Amino acid sequence: VASGGAGKDEPVLDDDEQLSGEEEFDEIDELALKGRKPIPINSCLFCNHDSEDVEQNLEHMRAEHSFALPEQKYISDLEGYLTYLGEKVGLGHL
């Protein structure tokens, strides 16, 4: 783990380092305690827009931000995938 552009207490991983599942859960808990929150599946990943449902949210992100999920027909758990993306973006793991 290297230190860099992040805050003093936030680890920065080198490109070849990855967190284990348990380490990632611990880091998510730590970030949540610092006030960061995952983005809900009905909320846009890019702006403050909230949609009535997942499909409307995907349409908003496509129309307003040119965001599309490639090969969406092969995503078996769309809500789970959007939950994952919301955690990554909302907690700052880009």
Image: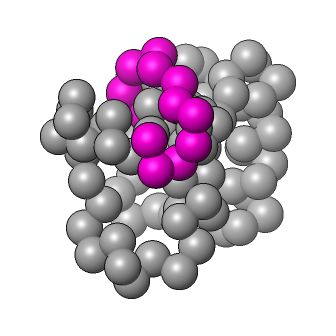
- What is the tally of numbered marks visible in this picture? 0
Indicate yes or no whether the magenta region holds residue 46: yes
Name the colouring of the figure: one colour
Magenta-colored segment: predominant secondary structure: loop
Percent of width and height locating residue 10: 60, 29
Relative to 58, 65 lies left or right: left
From this view, report whether residue 90 is shown above or below residue 14: above
- Location of the C terminus by quadrant is top left
Percent of width and height locating residue 80: 62, 63
Percent of width and height locating residue 34: 75, 19
Indicate yes or no whether the magenta region holds residue 37: no
Percent of width and height locating residue 43: 53, 31
Residue 62 appears in which quarter of the rendering? Answer: top left
Q: Is residue 36 visible?
A: yes
Range shown magenta: 45-56
For this rendering, which residue is in front, 48 or 28?
48
What residue is drawn where x is 60% and y is 59%? 79
What residue is drawn where x is 22% and y is 29%? 64
Residue 16 appears in which quarter of the rendering? Answer: bottom left
From this view, report whether residue 73 is shown above or below residue 9: below
For this rendering, which residue is in front, 38 or 29?
38
What residue is drawn where x is 40% and y is 52%? 14
Which residue ends up furthest to the left in the rendered image? 66
Relative to 16, 67 lies left or right: left
Residue 81 appears in which quarter of the rendering? Answer: bottom right
From this view, report whether residue 62 is shown above or below residue 4: below
Q: Is residue 19 visible?
A: no
